[in-house]
Amino acid sequence: MEIYLDNSSTTKPYPEVTSKVLEMLTNTYGNPSSLHRLGRESKIEMEKARKIIADSLGAVSEEIFFTSGGTESNNLAITGACLANESKGKRIVTTVAEHAAVTKTIRNLKRQGWQVEYVPAPNGVLDLNELENAIDGNTVLVSVMMVNNETGAIFPIQEIHEMIKRKSSPALLHCDAVQGYGKLPFTASSIGADLISISAHKIHGVKGAGALYVKKGTKLFTTMFGGGQERGLRSGTESTPLIAAFGEAVRVTFARLQEDIFHMAKLRDYCIERISKSIPTAVINSSKEGAPHIVNFSLPGTRNKEVVQFLDSKGIYISSGASCKSNHSRGPAMLESLGLSRALADSALRVSFSAMNTKNDINILVQALEEYFT
């Protein structure tokens, strides 16, 4: 038995994706910068993927730049935007709930003299009054995630876009949409972001591929120097097998987007109800108004890593938090910043769905949790 409920960490690639990788590695393996046939064929496949991704965002191909994933996209968007526009000011506004790829990039700029304002999000609800007060004429960048990777809380990106306009601020708006892309219906214009980070392996693509949407006319400096690929913004030979596979993942995902969102939302609601009913001591940290694929809950009195290990022994795979957090020993600052006590944060677990999951997966999970308490 294998019950995979850790889709916010990564997803199982579609069969179409793995087939595309193999095809590219065996038949279309040329360098896309080469002028010969194999190079041209590789370039064609890469540009097909770029067009598919651009269409999914309601954008044009020239606004899509390939990266190695969400982390690099966030780094490029934040550092590139700030360095390119520092003549307008040296102030960044962000939230306490961002992914480490955002917070650590901004922290690096802070060490270089940038002023940073962190907006609170008590109980996962972004304080829009604090955010509006923080934005001023010296603000160069506002960086806010679309979906919180721990709880599934959704932040109102379009409202923030309108806020920046209302304040007549020169700030660019960056949205880390890694957890929202393929899970929520949106386009670049519908949310109003100038920069949008996305990743392939969150939507059944392959790890190592991502993209950054850069609104036409946005001034951005490169942070990766070399041969000038990706129109000079991101040097380095493009990984055409992963990029072409990214295009396939987007094609399959967006062909059935509404159906899959509805399915995952049903699973989310069912999971919340089953856990609440079967484990009365559980504290649900997610909302049915949040993203359709994430349920975060705490089991007071337990250690979340021990619960994860117990479930692992049963062939059930969930998370004790963002998977990148397992790479270091710092505490669960993200959940505490959203208002959870240390005890609730230390016992928090995250279940995350894909369209491949079923209600029976949840039933098996809950039965195993009940067994853990007996």
Image (cartoon, rainbow, N blue to C red):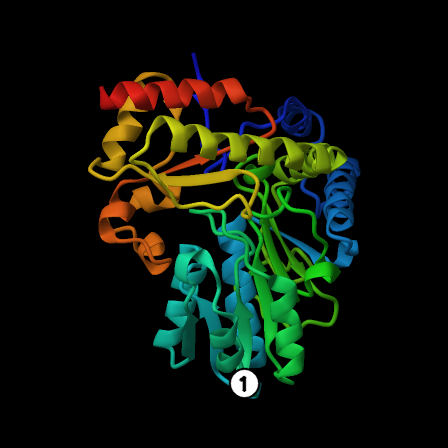
Relative height, residue 267 to residue 124 (above, below): above
Asked if residue 224 shows in the view, the reply is no
Of the pair 217 and 222, the residue shown nearer to us = 217
Seen from this angle, which residue lies furthest left? 301
Residue 63 drawn at (x, y percent): 73, 59
Front-most of 246 and 27?
A: 246
In percent of width and height, residue 56 lies at 74, 47
Residue 221 in the figure: left or right of residue 57: left
Residue placed furthest toward the top: 1
* 89 in relation to 215, above or below: below
In-front residue for pair 317/50: 317
Place residue 81 in its image quadrant: bottom right
Instruction: Tell me which residue sits at (26%, 53%) in the image.
Output: 341
Q: Residue at x 53, y 22 (%)?
A: 359
Q: Is 300 displayed left or right of 129 in the figure?
A: left
Where's residue 111, x and y in %? 34, 75
Does 276 sit left or right of 37 as displayed? left
Q: Is residue 57 left or right of residue 212?
A: right
Image position, residue 48 (x, y; %): 78, 41
Quadrant housing the C terminus: top left
Residue that label 1 marks = 136
Asked if one can make out residue 121 in the rendered structure from this viewpoint, the answer is: yes
Point 38% across, 69% down: residue? 108
Q: Nearer the viewer, residue 72 or 315?
A: 315
Number of callouts = 1
SS of the residue under disc 1: loop
Q: Residues within 10 Å of mark 1 (few under 14, many from 20)?
A: some
State which quadrant residue 337 falls in: bottom left
Q: Amino acid at mark 1?
A: Asp
Image position of 152 with respect to 204: above or below? below
